[in-house]
Amino acid sequence: MTIVKESRRAPATLSERRMAVDAAAHRIRRHALFMGEVQGQGYVGQALGAADILATVYADQLRFRPEDPEWEGRDRFLLSTGHYAIGLYAALAEAGIIPVEELETYGSDGSRLPMSGMSTYTPGMEISGGSLGHGLTIAVGLALGLRYRGNQARIINFLSDGELDEGSTWEAAMGAAHHRLGRLTAVVDINALQADGATEGVLRTEPVADKWAACGWRVFRVDGNDVGALLEAFDAAGSGERDGAPAVVLCDTKVGRGVPLLEQREKAHFMRIEEHEWAICNEQLDAGWAARHDGIQGAARQEEKA
C-alpha cells in the first residue's frame, strides 16, 4: 500500500502540532550537528537557525510520498540557498526521504549529499541552488507550468535575506503577483548575516515587509524560531485562493539557534568547529531542548484545561 503524507494536520490542537514540529526540529538540529562533525566545518549555523522552518514545512505542511520523491502530486520545496543543503538533508532524513544512515556521507566523494544542494544527486532536492537570486525565478516558472497542467500542488521557495540584494528576486516577485500565483509561498530566512558580513552593512533591505507588499504579495512576518508562530503563518499563507496573491513568510532567525556556543560567534556564516567543541554543542542542544519541551508540554496541558 502506498502511503501519502498529506498536509499533516492530524493533531487536533495547535499545541499538539507544535509539539510534533518542535520535536522534529530538534532531530533536524541533531542531524545537522552530526553532519557538521563529519566535515569539521560548514554552514552549520544556518541549518540550526532554519531548523524550525524546515520542520514546520516537512512535518506539517507538505504533501509527499517518502518512497516516491518524484510523485507528480507532491508539493514542491525549492531550496534556493544551496549552501543550506546540510539543513535540508537533515529534514529529508527526518521525513524518511533519505536514510538517516546516509547522513554520515555528507560532503564525501561520491556521496548523494554534496555540501551544496544538487537535484541530480539527492532525492527530494527539487533544484540545484547556490547561485543566489535564481530560486524565486525558478519557482515562478514552475508555478506557471503546474497551473497550465492543472496541478494543484503548493510550491514553497526558501531563500535568504542576502538574496534580496539580487534584482532577479524582485523581478520574480513582481511576476508572481502579476500572474496571481496563489499556490506559491516564498520563505525568507532573515538571519541578518551573509558572506560579506552583516546584511545591514552590505545592502539594507528594510522595510522588507513593505517592499513585498508593494509587489503585491500577502506578507507574514514572524519569529522564525517560534514554531507556534510559524504554524499560524504557514497555515494563513497556504489558505489563499489558487489564482490569488502569492504569500511570503518573513522569518527572523538566529544563526546557530539552540547551541549557545555557536550563537555567540561573530563570524558564523561558515563555521570551523574544533574537535572538542562538538560534544559541547550536542550537550547544549539537548539541554535546551529538554527545557523547551517541558514548557511546550505545560502549555498543552493548560490548553486542555481551558
Image: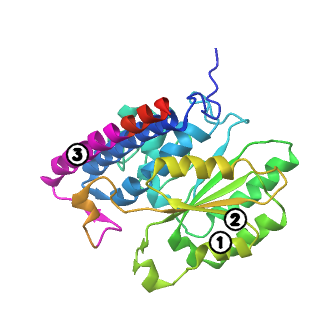
Foreground of the two, 193 or 11: 11
- The crowding category of the residue bearing disc 1, from other C-alpha atoms within 10 Å (few below 14, some 14 to 19, many at least 20), is some
Question: Which residue type does callout 2 highlight?
Answer: Thr
Picture residue at 67% right of the left edge, 53% below the top: 237
| Percent x, y of residue 225 | 43, 54
Foreground of the two, 218 or 84: 218
**Circle on res. 137:** 2
Picture residue at 75% right of the left edge, 51% below the top: 183
Asked if the residues shown at circle 1 and circle 2 are in contact, with their CB atoms under 8 angstroms apart, the answer is yes
| Percent x, y of residue 93 | 44, 36
> On the image, which quarter does residue 263 sit in?
bottom left
> On the image, which quarter does residue 22 sit in?
top left
**Mark 3 or mark 1: which comes first in sequence?**
1
| 291 part of magenta stretch | yes
Picture residue at 35% right of the left edge, 47% below the top: 32
> On the image, which quarter does residue 23 sit in?
top left
**Mark 3 or mark 2: which comes first in sequence?**
2
Residue that badge 1 annotates: 169
Left or right of 238, for residue 89: left
- The crowding category of the residue bearing disc 2, from other C-alpha atoms within 10 Å (few below 14, some 14 to 19, many at least 20), is many
Outermost residue, top side: 1
**The residue stretch that appears in magenta:** 267-295
